[in-house]
Image (cartoon, rainbow, N blue to C red):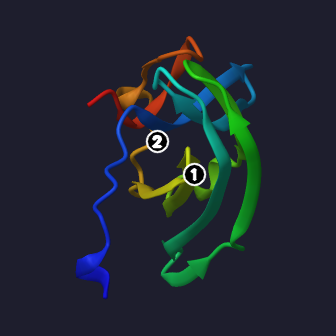
Amino acid sequence: MKKDLPENIVEDISIAIVLESETPLEKIWNVYLVNEKNHDISNVLVSSKGYGQKDGREVKTTTLRHFIGDVSAQSAVKIEAIDTQVFGLTNEYWLSYYIDKTIYDKKYIFLPESIVDENLMKVPLVNKAGILIGGTR
């Protein structure tokens, strides 16, 4: 059963929503996977979805699945673009990957209204401003 499975703890892996560029009229945001490990990860799969309340009614976005493949040590890869219209929703990213023959998975959740300028920080390896969940131990 589930209790018999080993606990594979995800460390040194982050999901970041990064401000790529901005003009007076719009901001361009992308979602990145940040691998701060000292070794590669393989068969990386990320599913993303949004859900919550908007204008007084329940809203769900389409679930998207992204096969990233291999991600080198100490690197970051773009997962998807993200529209500012979903920032008021809960945005969930479920990551799974392998190291050697061991599978790891973790869910990263950006709460509604957490993607705001006050929460921006420099995202490692991307070297741009963004909101980061996860990271080094």
Looking at the picture, which amino acid does disc 1 mark? Tyr
- Furthest toward the front, the residue is 101
- Left of 59 or right of it: where is 107? left
Residue plotted at (75% across, 45% down): 69
**To which quarter of the image does residue 96 belong?**
bottom right
Q: Secondary structure at mark 1?
A: strand
How far across and how far down the image is residue 72, in percent?
A: 65, 25
The numbered mark, 2 or 1, whose residue comes first in the sequence reads 1
Q: Secondary structure at mark 2?
A: loop
- Left of 58 or right of it: where is 77? right
- Furthest toward the top, the residue is 127
User: Which quadrant is home to the C terminus?
Assistant: top left
Between residue 78 and residue 5, name the one nearer to us.
5
How far across and how far down the image is residue 35, in percent?
A: 53, 29
Looking at the picture, which amino acid does disc 2 mark? Ile
Residue plotted at (31% across, 88% down): 1
Label 2 crowd bin: few (<14), some (14–19), many (20+), radius 10 Å? many
Q: Between tags 2 and 1, which lies in front?
A: 1
- Left of 52 or right of it: where is 33? right
Between residue 18 and residue 137, name the one nearer to us.
137
Residue receiving disc 1? 97
How far across and how far down the image is residue 117, in percent?
A: 44, 28
Residue 137 lies, with reference to residue 94, above or below; the image says: above
Residue 59 lies, with reference to residue 108, above or below; the image says: below
Residue receiving disc 2? 115
